[in-house]
Image: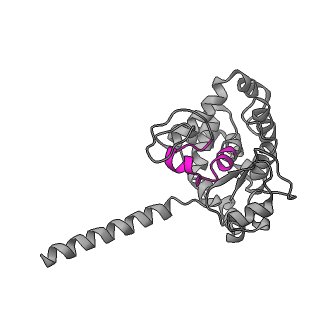
């Protein structure tokens, strides 16, 4: 009887440790998110022509680098609306079986929508700025802050370097054949890690949509943070907010 009780206690303890470990493992930092998804973004660039930097930056922004609720529970990294069968959260966002499905649906959306299809003829895969502005004009979002924030993400993490892999025929063939590959001696990620400080990126992984009357000071108090921290996390140059703007907390 005593052995049975001890056995149950050990089992429960192991389950708890596994749950905590799994939850912790699912928490992304900016650099780990990029490292996890850069190869897929490069492969999709080769397959479709959408710059890897744009794919990564939009996913980074829309999913709070993989830590938003819809990214965690629905594998939705691009804020695409649709049906889901989740019993964990109630959401108007589309559910996917994996992050890769979400990534492929995003580039598929670029190809399916008439307003987006013109971008493939108008911009090369190394013109990330043209692509980001074009996606905004095509109606991906109505938030005026979206374009500068996505562009700031590309520039801050040097994501445009991942677009250059397509310039090498040898590397292009290797990626097309294998689907994913590791860039040897990835100096970019080391640079990202160096800038990936807790002061800048301590976050709940959640976002807040600004409504009428919201101020940075009031939001900092509500979410137990500081005005300066909110500015850093959202690349804000001033305290001015726009209704509908989404803030990383």
| 43 is within the stretch colored magenta | no
Question: Residue at the top extreme?
Answer: 114
* Quadrant (top left/top right/bottom left/bottom right) for the N terminus: bottom left
Whether residue 226 is situated above or below residue 133 in the rendered picture: below
Depth check, front residue: 151 or 84: 84
**Residue 76 at x, y percent in the picture:** 56, 42
Q: Measuring 56% from the left and 32% from the top, which residue is drawn there?
A: 82
> Most extreme residue toward the bottom, as rendered?
2
| Residue 63 makes an appearance in the image | yes
Q: Nearer the viewer, residue 82 or 137?
A: 82
Q: Is residue 18 left or right of residue 149?
A: left
Q: Nearer the viewer, residue 189 or 239?
A: 239
Residue drawn at (62%, 41%) of the image: 78
**246 and 117: which is toward the camera:** 246
Position of residue 14 in the picture relative to residue 128 (left or right): left
- Give the image location of residue 65, x and y in percent: 63, 53
Q: Quadrant of residue 249?
A: bottom right
Residue lying farthest front?
213
Quadrant housing residue 237: bottom right
Please report the residue visible at 79 percent of the width from the left and 57 percent of the height from the top.
Answer: 235
Let me know if residue 60 is in the magenta part.
yes
What residue lies at 44% left-to-right and 66% top-to-bottom? Answer: 21
Query: Which region shows up in magenta?
Result: 58-78
Residue 195 location (% of width, % of height): 72, 66
Q: Is residue 185 visible from the viewing direction of this image?
A: no
Q: Count the marks: how many?
A: 0
Residue 86: percent from the left, percent from the top?
46, 42
């Amino acid at each position: 009887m005593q052995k049975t009780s001890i056995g149950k206690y050990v089992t429960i303890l192991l389950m708890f440790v596994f749950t905590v470990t799994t939850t912790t493992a699912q928490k992304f930092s900016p650099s780990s998110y990029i490292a996890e998804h850069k190869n897929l973004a490069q492969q999709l660039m080769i397959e479709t022509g959408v710059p890897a930097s744009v794919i990564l930056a939009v996913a980074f922004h829309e999913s709070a680098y993989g830590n938003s609720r819809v990214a965690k529970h629905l594998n939705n990294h691009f804020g695409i609306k649709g049906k889901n069968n989740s019993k964990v959260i109630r959401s108007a966002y589309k559910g996917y079986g994996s992050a890769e499905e979400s990534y492929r649906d995003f580039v598929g959306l670029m190809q399916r929508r008439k307003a987006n299809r013109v971008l493939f003829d108008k911009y090369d895969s190394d013109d990330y700025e043209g692509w980001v502005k074009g996606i905004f004009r095509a109606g991906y979002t109505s938030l005026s802050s979206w374009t500068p924030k996505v562009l700031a993400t590309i520039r801050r993490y040097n994501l445009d370097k991942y677009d250059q892999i397509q310039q090498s025929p040898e590397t292009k063939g290797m990626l097309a054949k294998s689907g994913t590959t590791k860039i040897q001696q990835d100096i970019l990620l080391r640079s990202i890690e160096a800038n990936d400080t807790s002061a800048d990126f301590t976050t709940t992984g959640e976002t807040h949509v600004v409504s009428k009357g919201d101020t940075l000071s009031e939001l900092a108090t509500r979410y137990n943070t500081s005005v300066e921290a909110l500015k850093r996390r959202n690349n804000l140059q001033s305290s001015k907010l726009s209704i509908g703007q989404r803030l990383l907390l």
